[in-house]
Amino acid sequence: MTHVARFVLAVLLLVACAPAWGQKFGYIDTEFIMGKLPEYTQAQAELAKLTDTWQKEIEAQKKDLDKLYRTYQAEEVVLTEAMKKKRQDEILKKEQDIKAYETKQFGYEGQLFKKRIELNKPAQDKIFDAVEKVVKARKLDFMFDRNGDLTMLYANPTHDYTEFVLEELGLGSPTRNQPGSKGPIKTVKPPKTPTASTDPAFESDSGTPTPAVGTPAADKGTKAKPTRANKAVSGERP
């Protein structure tokens, strides 16, 4: 009975999987297609402009904070305890306001995040409509995005429908929008090894440099260092 049951189960599995063998599928390179759309290029330019504007506003606020701190340092010896407390509170509030503004503009689900979704949506909708038409015209059952979460270890070019989507968008090319032939091999000189005297971000044996503001390393969660405002409250001098 055991062998019979296994045989029946195997037959049932084969019958269930048989329809999937006849299904057609394809994939597209959405990143490549997006780069061809003028709407997407315009959206990226606008995002870069907004980012630059907000970053300059933050830098201006930090300059004001630095000015407050230096003024406090210069006048600390002649201030009463009540006046010191007031100045320290002003510095702390200014620092908190700057951090709150940075989070509002560049944090998770901040203004930049929302603006990116808003500006990219027209291009994404346009691609989706074109994909839908290609799928129906080519009688496909599935369409994958090779740049999505699905990991494609190998993709047969036969199933690449990127060009068909581009044609549907009016961006078709007789050369199938493929990268041009490679030019002559050029010799690239290796970069010079940075030193502490030429590169302020050079990491020496004495420690690790602090990443500059705005760099990916600075945006990641690193161990917070004492701020000037905290030093002011504790009575320490930098």
Image (cartoon, rainbow, N blue to C red):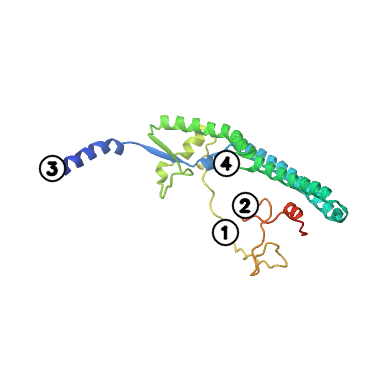
Is residue 138 visible to us here? yes
Which of 180/140 is in front?
Answer: 140
Contact (CB < 8 A) between labels 2 and 3?
Answer: no
Disc assigned to residue 184: 1
Q: In the rendered view, does 148 fall on the left or right side of 86?
A: left
State the separation of the CA atoms marked 2 and 3. Answer: 62 Å
From the viewer's side, name the closer residue of 43 and 220.
Answer: 220
Please tell me which residue is depicted at 47% across the width and 36% down the height of the picture.
164
Residue type of the residue flagged with mark 4: Gly
- Secondary structure at badge 4 equals helix
In-image side of 113 versus 54 (left or right): left
Q: Which residue is mark 2?
A: 216
Say if 199 sits above or below 214 in the image.
below
Q: Position of residue 187 (x, y in %)?
A: 60, 64
Residue, disc 4: 35
Please tell me whether residue 37 is drawn above or below residue 189 in the rendered image: above
Of badges 1 and 3, nearer the viewer stands 3
Q: At numbered mark 3, what does the secondary structure look like: helix, strand or loop?
A: helix
Q: Quadrant of the N terminus?
A: top left
Q: Earlier in the sequence, mark 2 or mark 3?
A: 3
Q: Nearer the observer, disc 3 or disc 4?
A: 3
- Asked if marks 1 and 3 touch (Cβ < 8 Å), the reply is no
Q: Is residue 38 visible?
A: no
Task: Say which residue label 3 marks.
Answer: 4
